[in-house]
């Protein structure tokens, strides 16, 4: 059984489950490149043909490029179905005030070279600080490169509704909106839904299992001691505090376990399935470290949450304290606890 697909825009179809790439960039353990390439092959053969990466994920674009080169004959003769590579354009915080078209072009050219392709399928644009002007101009830089044929489609990531609206009003067309969106983080509903619906810019969601917190591993377990083992857990443990704290999180896990028992799956699959059934969600990005997770990912297309399940989950979400505010607002505050763990200048160092 192949993973379900969706047409993001006429003529462009992706798998609804996307293979995330952040975990391959370091900070999540040692990466065996040959094993990673074998894992990519297994995912594509299972129908997970859409990969998510970024120019700031050290080594990941190049690693995907090696995968494409290793299996180029199989792609050419059709024995492997085509893949879609979604990358990001994330200029460094320290460069925002002096960003020019030539800078954008150089970074996009670097992504093309790393991936070994002539055109990038989807480039998702991010901007660290709205107080620094220039994001509308930078989006127009990408639009120019799209017109030149270097980019097929444009998307955005971690923009709030107000600033996305500015770029849309300037004539930039986006086909996808990558946001942190899960049972624990409902900020897109508060901030983006109306614009997402009216402009038909569906969500691609990350953080769906909260770095692994939304899983059986943490059910009925004490709050893990600091420091946590990787950057994902550090990030999403803060989201749990915003959601209502660790005890309320445990109550949520117990509910999800009851629903999981009903469908004979695990908590992580319920969390993922819930997001796939959310209105306006085109796909979810799963940071599966290797093909051992593939069987569980395939389960996401083999069950459906019924009205009773959805009502129970929405009821507990309705009791959550947060997080509140615009999309990525907490993370954008460099002096706050969410922003202070971010790394704002990775583009140049990822060269």
Image (cartoon, rainbow, N blue to C red):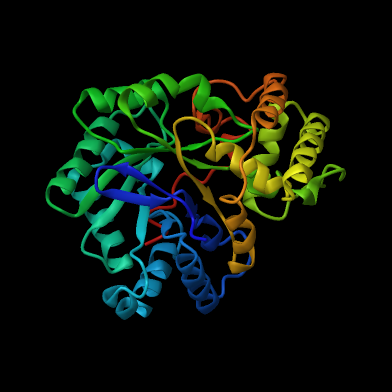
Measuring 59% from the left and 36% from the top, which residue is drawn there? 182
Q: Relative to the observer, which residue lies in front, 22 or 127?
A: 22
Residue 283 x %, y %: 46, 44
Q: Relative to the observer, which residue lies in front, 286 or 49?
A: 49
With 147 as the anchor, is 302 left or right in this view?
A: right
- Does any portion of residue 48 appear in the rendered image? yes
Q: How many labels, in total?
A: 0
With 116 as the anchor, is 330 left or right in this view?
A: right
Measuring 28% from the left and 36% from the top, which residue is drawn there? 174
In this view, 79 is above or below 89: below
Residue 145 x %, y %: 17, 48
- Does any portion of residue 90 appear in the rendered image? no
Residue 245 x %, y %: 77, 29
Measuring 60% from the left and 30% from the top, which residue is drawn there? 336
Q: Quadrant of the C terminus?
A: bottom left
In this view, 169 is above or below 334: above
With 102 as the anchor, is 348 left or right in this view?
A: right
Query: Residue 280 appears in which quarter of the rendering?
Result: top left
Query: Residue 65 appears in which quarter of the rendering?
Result: bottom left
Q: Relative to the observer, which residue lies in front, 320 or 32?
A: 320
Residue 6 x %, y %: 39, 46
With 331 as the anchor, is 265 left or right in this view?
A: right
In this view, 78 is above or below 261: below
In this view, 159 is above or below 78: above
């Amino acid at each position: 059984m192949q993973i379900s697909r969706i047409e993001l825009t006429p003529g462009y179809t992706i798998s609804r489950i996307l293979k995330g790439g952040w975990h391959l960039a370091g900070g999540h353990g040692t990466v065996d490149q040959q094993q990673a390439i074998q894992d990519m092959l297994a995912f594509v053969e299972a129908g997970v043909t859409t990969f998510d990466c970024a120019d700031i994920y050290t080594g990941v674009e190049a690693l995907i490029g090696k995968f494409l080169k290793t299996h180029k004959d199989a792609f050419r003769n059709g024995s492997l179905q085509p893949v879609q590579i979604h990358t990001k354009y994330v200029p460094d915080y320290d460069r925002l005030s002096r960003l020019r078209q030539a800078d954008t072009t150089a970074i996009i050219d670097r992504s093309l070279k790393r991936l070994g392709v002539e055109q990038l399928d989807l480039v998702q644009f991010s901007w660290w600080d709205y107080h620094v002007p220039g994001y509308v101009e930078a989006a127009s830089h990408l639009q120019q490169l799209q017109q030149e044929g270097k980019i097929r489609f444009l998307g955005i990531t971690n923009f709030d509704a107000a600033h996305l609206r500015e770029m849309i009003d300037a004539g930039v067309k986006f086909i996808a909106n990558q946001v942190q969106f899960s049972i624990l983080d409902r900020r897109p509903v508060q901030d983006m839904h109306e614009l997402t619906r009216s402009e038909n810019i569906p969500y691609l969601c990350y953080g769906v299992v909260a770095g692994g917190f939304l899983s059986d591993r943490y059910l009925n377990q004490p709050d893990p001691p600091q420091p946590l083992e990787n950057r994902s857990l550090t990030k999403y443990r803060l989201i749990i505090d915003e959601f209502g704290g660790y005890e309320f999180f445990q109550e949520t896990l117990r509910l999800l376990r009851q629903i999981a028992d009903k469908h004979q799956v695990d908590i992580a699959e319920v969390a993922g399935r819930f997001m796939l059934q959310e209105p306006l969600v085109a796909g979810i990005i799963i940071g599966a470290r290797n093909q051992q997770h593939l069987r569980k990912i395939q389960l996401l297309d083999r069950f459906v949450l019924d009205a009773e399940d959805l009502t129970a989950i929405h009821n507990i979400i309705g009791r959550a304290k947060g997080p509140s505010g615009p999309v990525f607002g907490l993370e954008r505050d460099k002096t706050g606890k969410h922003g202070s763990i971010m790394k704002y200048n990775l583009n140049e160092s990822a060269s």
